[in-house]
Amino acid sequence: MVAPPTQPPAQRKVIHVDMDAFYASVEQRDDPSLKGKPVAVGGSRARGVVAAASYEARAFGVRSAMPSVTAIRRCPDLVFVPPRFDVYREVSDRIRAIFADYTDLIEPLSLDEAYLDVTEDIRGLGTASAIAEEIRARIKADTGLTASAGVSYNKFIAKLASDQNKPDGICIITPRRGAAFVQSLPVKRFHGVGPVTAQKMERLGILTGADLFERSLAFLQANFGSYADYLYGAARGIDHRPVRVNRAAKSVGAERTFETNLSAAEDLRAALHRVADAAWVRIERHGTRGRTVTLKLRHADFRTITRARSSQAAVTDKAAFLAAGLELLMMQLPVPDGVRLLGLTLSGIMGDDDEVQPSLL
């Protein structure tokens, strides 16, 4: 007996909701004297790092994970406020409760952004764009904060779209427009393409989605290995990844490449402080905890080593995270040839994830 033909899967309807300058906006909401001012959440000390910046600060080129001293040089009137992660988590929980009124398929990426699969319209609003607009309105009414949303037929395009009309905007990309939309954008905006990958693409003459579309799968495999299938599909507006509930990252961290190689122990310790600050911002943003701290060290001759230390209990604060990293670093000294890159990550987090992860470079 011949089996009946299988029906193609229904077209997904995916919303990516991204809060606008989340940490800084919470601070401006709670302290009206900060409204309209360039605000950075983070530490203003010499080894401090910007965790988040208001749009007023971004106009001066201030960005998250930037050293505080650099941020102050770019914006002398910058106002620093210490982070209040307990408050950010409370607001994030309220926002996720709103999401849950529209779908059970919610994939948080961090405290301030998430994917929602609204293929099943459980509230009978008619369209995914109507759902996104109602969610945005409820977030504004409940929290006093604005959110931007991207609405499309897959995760890749929905995330690109949410950034298109920021702040407080919405962008809808239909299946008919998907490939053309992707091909009109610079590849450095693609989720998963960090600065290092973008620089490699530029050397290969790939600056836009259209340039990427022109490259064969064999070419991409030769230059990007297992990442090639994702890139090949992305350039065509194709992304079959489902929205995954309770997704957990394998590791979260940061790394920095230095303009000049570092060899003095004091300089390396200071650099690791800054890397740990930047990494901990991401760890807190993801709301994750792990047991393994891994140091990445690249020598001047590009030899790269990793050293890890695991504990029985989860690493729950930045001091313990930094202390583990410093212990690993001290075991590698001296380094007379110099170090060009340091990285620090936290892993051993529950769950398994085969998603394409954003570059930490």
Image: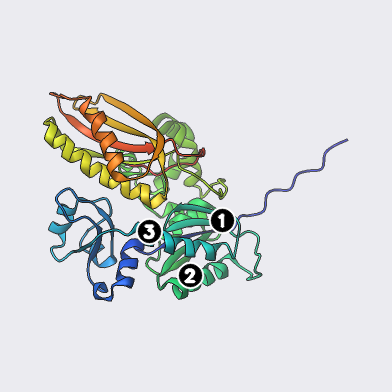
The location of residue 1, given as percent across then percent down, is: 88, 35
The disc, 3 or 2, on the residue closer to the chain's N-terminal end is 3
* Residue drawn at point x = 15 percent, y = 24 percent: 334
Mark sitting on residue 136: 2
The disc, 3 or 1, on the residue closer to the chain's N-terminal end is 3
* Residue drawn at point x = 38 percent, y = 58 percent: 86
Give the labeled residue for mark 1: 153
Can you tell which of label 1 and label 2 is closer to the viewer? 2
Q: Picture quarter containing residue 199? A: top left
Q: In this view, does 49 lie above or below 269?
A: below
Q: Picture quarter containing residue 314? A: top left
Residues at marks 3 and 2, CA–CA distance in whole angstroms: 23 Å
Secondary element under disc 3, as helix, strand or loop, is: helix
The location of residue 361, given as percent across then percent down, is: 31, 41
**Label 3 is placed on what type of residue?**
Asp
**Label 2 is placed on what type of residue?**
Arg
Q: In this view, does 104 lie above or below 133?
A: above
On the rendered structure, is 117 left or right of 39? Answer: right
Give the labeled residue for mark 3: 86
On the rendered structure, is 207 left or right of 143? Answer: left
**Label 1 is placed on what type of residue?**
Tyr
The location of residue 83, given as percent across then percent down, is: 29, 58
* Residue drawn at point x = 20 percent, y = 32 percent: 340
- Residue 40 appearing in the image: yes
Neighbour class for label 3 at 10 Å: few (<14), some, many (≥20)? few
Secondary element under disc 1, as helix, strand or loop, is: loop
Neighbour class for label 2 at 10 Å: few (<14), some, many (≥20)? many
The residue closer to the viewer here, 231 or 207, is 231
The residue closer to the viewer here, 294 or 220, is 294
